[in-house]
Image (tube, grey):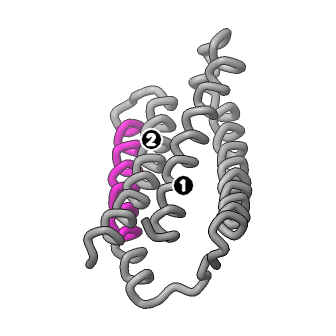
Amino acid sequence: MDIKEKRILLTLITSVMTFAFYIIYVYQNILKDNLDLLNDFKFWGKSFLILIPVAIVIQIVVHIGFAIYIKVTSDEEIDPIDDERDKLIELKAIKISHHIFIVGFALSMGSLAMDMRPWVMFVILLSSGFIASIVNEILRLYYYRKGI
């Protein structure tokens, strides 16, 4: 497996684990005793504002650790330069994942238009962002394996 494929797989696994642990943490420590918070916009705002930097920091730390691990174990360099193939793969994957997120965004706004509870909108929005991220990484891995 190529180093770029390993990095993509690492990002995929880290994203899934971060999201799962964050959801479990929020439920166990905040929502378990007070389900009325689901309709509180302040709760959702704090949840999003905490999840984003936490996920970014975790990704950065994991990728730095991966670079150190690769350098120590295999004495290979992680090439920071992307060629045209890498950029094309990234653009194709991002295009599809953006479409998935836009559909999720439209569904979340539609849930508000249909007078559903506010938490439904936030769950759809959060889920569509997560699914778009996962699809992006899977497509990148697929395009590296299959070719364009």
Pointer 1: residues within 10 angstroms few (<14), some, or many (20+)? Answer: some
Examine the structure image and report whether residue 82 is included in the region drawn in magenta.
no
Examine the structure image and report whether residue 100 is included in the region drawn in magenta.
yes
Per the rendering, the mark at residue 127 is: 2
Q: Are marks 2 and 1 in contact (CB under 8 Å)?
A: no
Viewer-nearest of labels 2 and 1?
A: 1
Question: Mark 2 or 1 closer to N-term?
Answer: 1
Q: Which residues are magenta?
A: 93-113
Depicted 85 relative to depicted 27: above or below:
below
Q: Quadrant of the C terminus?
A: bottom left
Q: Position of residue 81 (x, y in %)?
A: 57, 86
Pointer 2: residues within 10 angstroms few (<14), some, or many (20+)? Answer: some
Per the rendering, the mark at residue 10 is: 1
**Left or right of 42 in this view: 24:** left
> Given the current orientation, which residue lies at the most extreme top position?
33
- The amino acid on which the numbered mark 2 sits, given as a three-letter code, is Ser
Give the residue drawn at x 46%, y 89%.
Answer: 83
Q: Position of residue 143 (x, y in %)?
A: 31, 70
Query: Alpha carbon of mark 2 to alpha carbon of mark 1: how far?
Result: 20 Å
Depicted 91 relative to depicted 85: above or below:
above
Q: Along the line of sight, which residue is nearer the eye, 7 or 25?
A: 7
Give the residue drawn at x 44%, y 83%.
Answer: 87
Q: Along the line of sight, which residue is nearer the eye, 77 or 30?
A: 77
Q: Position of residue 142 (x, y in %)?
A: 31, 64
Q: Give the total of numbered labels.
A: 2
**Left or right of 69 in this view: 104:** left
Q: Quadrant of residue 57?
A: bottom right
Depicted 95 relative to depicted 46: above or below:
below
Q: Quadrant of the N terminus?
A: bottom left
Give the residue drawn at x 59%, y 82%.
Answer: 79
